[in-house]
Image (spheres, helix red, strand yellow):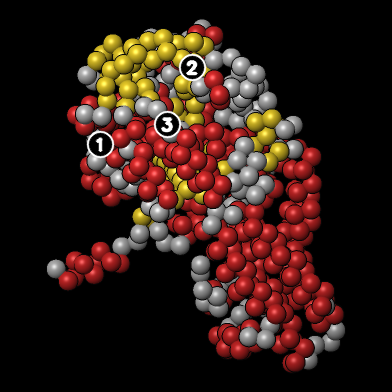
Amino acid sequence: MLFARSLENNMPKKFYITTPIYYTNNPPHVGSAYTTIAVDVLARYYRQKGKKVFFLTGTDEHGEKNAQAAKKANKSPQEFVDEIAKSFKETWRALDISNDDFIRTTEPRHIKGAQKFLSALKKSGKIYQGKYEGLYCIGCEKFITKKELADGKCPDHQKAPKKVSETNYFFKLSDFLDRVKKLISHDKIKIEPLERKNEVLALLKQGLEDFSISRQKVKWGIPLPFDKKQISYVWVEALVNYITAIGYGSNQKKFNQLWPADLHLIGKDILKFHALYWPALLLAVGLKPPRKIFVHGFLTADGQKMSKTLGNVIDPIYLADKYGVDALRYFLLREIPFGQDGDFSIKRLEERYNADLANGLGNLVSRVLTLSEKAGNFPVIASERKRAKQSRRKNELIKGVKSTQKKYKKALEKIKFHEALEVIWRLISACDEFIEKNKPWTLISEQRTANSEQKLKEILLSLLLSLKEIAVLLRPFMPATSEKILSQIKLNKKTEVLFPRL
């Protein structure tokens, strides 16, 4: 028994992280790439730390908007969403996304799990039948109130919602609001940034009505298991993907290992569904709510939210082909403080590419490798390890590496991508300053003595080790670039022990 417990304690801790599932009325755009790359960076980082990561993304394929898009394309809804789901998978592969699973809401495993969840809701006694009369925004696939409109239109889609009158099933949200409020207030469901937590608490203070979990007149979706004439409201069914993908309704062992989610990363336009509706629905069926929800801002184009409905989207494949996958990944997370709105600009991407990647990182790698080659590519032998360990205490560059590691870890675990990248680039600048200060090229060109040769070795070793650490820190953000740098350095195993891995 003690042996079994010891084994369990040594098992890596799980980290279940998700993107929202993306709506399939159109192919992916740079806005959806922004969210997915952010989650990918976190997944890669926590894998690097030794956690057992499960990274989920996918597509939301039911609902009225998808059915309308399919009709416009002269295709059946299933044919249409099959094509769009394929384009999402291809895009994520092209952007070097390391997801562990891709859930589609038209898959049998999701349909089976969603119907199990709906049956559990019915059994809970927390749903009832009633009549809904009001406004519905097809672009958002949500019911909307007059006070949410701007000049009579949905502020996100710039279209007037349609009037709806139908008999639906409703969820008794009001029965769970106090519990959800307590969980959020005490950070049992942690919502970040803080302003988003305050936004949710303000919504709770205003009061929220029970909401419909079904649609009477929509045909493209999952029928309620207890009333085949009603289709599950797309938002309720879509949220359930987070549990159906990990075995709810099909693999209970896997579900028990992974749930609850450690992090849902979402855009601010779907905050209410994730922070209020989703925890309440889970509580109703006796499941734990997610541990953390992080909310990022809108990626705008010319000041407007980037939206397929508004027609101002940019194809991420085009950007990756033109500027490189890693350059796009870097720019999206370096340019905009994560959690805030930010405007996408080709001009700024090109400026960042030239200043940070070509003239910053690229130039440093070239300088260090050229100096090392001209010096004769000194091998690092065991006797030099001791000397290097002794000298690192007084070496300002090595001290900078240690400081960078700490700041980087703190920034990434607070989901401040731009700060993590900023500290890496400070280290790049410090390496350039170290080169200028120590002028290793003079030691290379002069007649060497035993002392000058040892000094040159120590300078180059410090630079190579710093470059190695820069590559390791960049790995979650720019995986291909990181591996290329590490392969160019070709440090042997003896140098790896000088600095502990993160």
> Where residue 197 appears, x then y in whole percent?
50, 46
Q: Is residue 497 visible?
A: yes
Query: How far separated are the C-alphas under marks 3 and 2?
Result: 17 Å
At label 3, the amino acid type is Leu
Element under label 2?
strand
Question: Can you say whether 13 is above or below 347 in the image?
Answer: below
Residue lying at 25% horizontally and 47% vertically, measured from the top left:
256
For marks 3 and 1, the one nearer the N-term is 3
The answer to whether residue 83 is seen in the rendering is no
Residue placed under numbered mark 3 in the picture: 208
Q: Which residue is mark 2?
A: 136
- Depth check: 80 or 268 in front? 268
Distance (Cα) linking label 2 and label 1:
27 Å
- Say which label, 3 or 2, has the lower sequence index: 2
Q: Classify residue 168 by image quadrant.
A: top left
Mark 3, other Cα within 10 Å: few <14 / some 14–19 / many ≥20: few
Q: Is residue 463 left or right of residue 169?
A: right
Q: Going 37% across and 22% down the picture, which residue do you hit?
A: 212
Rate crowding at label 2 as few (under 14), some (14 to 19) or many (20 or more) other CA atoms within 10 Å. some
Q: Position of residue 357 (x, y in %)?
A: 73, 53
Amino acid type, mark 2: Tyr
Q: CA distance from mark 3 to mark 1?
A: 20 Å
Name the secondary structure under disc 1: loop
